[in-house]
Amino acid sequence: MEPRQEASGTPTPAVSQDAAEKILDVMTLKEKIGQVLMIGVPATGSSAADRSTIATHELGNFFLKGRSRGGTAATKSVVKGIESVIAKSLSVDVKAFVATDQEGGSVQVLKGAGFSTLPAALTQGGWATATLRERATGWGKELAKTGINVNLAPVADTVPSATFAPSNAPIGYWKREYGYDPQTVSAASLAFSDGMHAAGVDPVIKHFPGLGRVTKNTDTAKNVTDTKTTRNDAALRPFKDGIAAGNDWIMVSNAYYSKIDAKNIAPFSSTIMRGMLREDLGFDGIVVSDDMCDAVQLDPWAYGTRALNFFEAGGTMMLCVDAAKVPGIAKALHAKASEDPAFARIIDSAALHVLRAKDN
């Protein structure tokens, strides 16, 4: 690139590329797509088919799913094995995002020797924030010891009351909420996030713009709709505060929000991902989906359509816990990006967000 000439004739330096841009420039389209997908593999160990999918489609991120009681040593072995496959399949040296779901209570993927037993978020929310931060740091160090660098937690959803909680199938029923008002949830989710960061693990604030007011669970039901949350809702405070604190990851829910975008589920909504997250809240990190492969809420759409809709609406990384569905998704994205320059730029932008986060 030649230096620009100002009107005075004095040359000004060309805009320099950052490290992530340089990596993006030498990546193939397949590798770029691999950076914006996260595949699910069993926490107890990947199969030969899983590893083949990762290598064939040059995937750059994986999620340990299910439940394991193997402890830190066994988990580290699982992680290293998959990381080796990723390293061998890529033409560039880019670390993998290795994620799991270690919230506490009923949602704790990893247990066994070396892993603490985490209480439910409702219990955590009753602790002093300094206590929660300290304990989350310890939990994060347990994850980091195994090579995990992303935790799909904390839950920042506000359930409106203790009486409603049992009817709130995705969150309150399981005591996944930190409390019943945005201030309490914000303070606790920030403390949890701070602890994870201190341990070198990226927390993922979820499930934007909130699942605390629905009754059905998007994992097990269709047409799950929040009829109350607005674009400037007070219940958005935990997400807003988390973004202001510098968190790099937000997970978007799979629900409809009739007062925000009645026509589109959140991962298909440009209003929610571009309008609310990017514009209203100034978020510049990774917008990751909730699982978009096994969730019943997404049954009406083909897998490739789900992926295209998500990225066209402004998503950054698509989570698919069913590894068998990933090849079709990757192929659909590749076909669209190969024939549509505008969509190719969308993939480039998403991949650049991921690469910049990996470079931090």
Image (cartoon, rainbow, N blue to C red):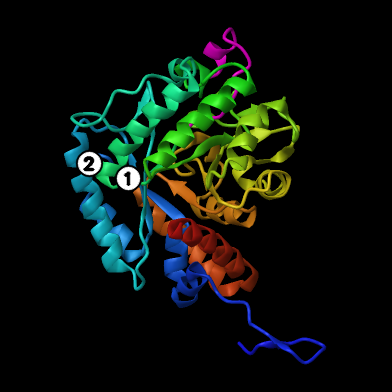
58 and 190: which is toward the camera: 190
Residue 114: image x %, image y %?
A: 21, 32
* Residue type pointed to by label 2: Thr
Decide whether residue 159 is among the magenta residues: yes
| Residue at (31, 34) in percent of width and height | 66
Which one is in front, 230 or 268? Answer: 230
The residue shown at (34%, 23%) is 118
Is any atom of residue 357 visible in this view?
Answer: yes
Instruction: Report the side of 102 relative to 88 (left or right).
Output: right
- Mark carried by residue 148: 1
Q: Quadrant of residue 167?
A: top right
The boundaries of the magenta stretch are: 153-168
Front-most of residues 343 and 348: 348
Q: Main secondary structure of the magenta part?
A: loop
Q: Is residue 320 above or below residue 166?
A: below
Give the residue type that dot 1 points to: Ile
Q: Earlier in the sequence, mark 2 or mark 1?
A: 2
Q: Position of residue 76 (x, y in %)?
A: 22, 45
Left or right of 3: which side holds 131?
Answer: left
**Label 1 CA crowd tier, 10 Å (few <14, some 14–19, many 20+):** many
Which residue is identified by label 2?
A: 75
Q: Position of residue 75 (x, y in %)?
A: 22, 41
SS for callout 1: loop
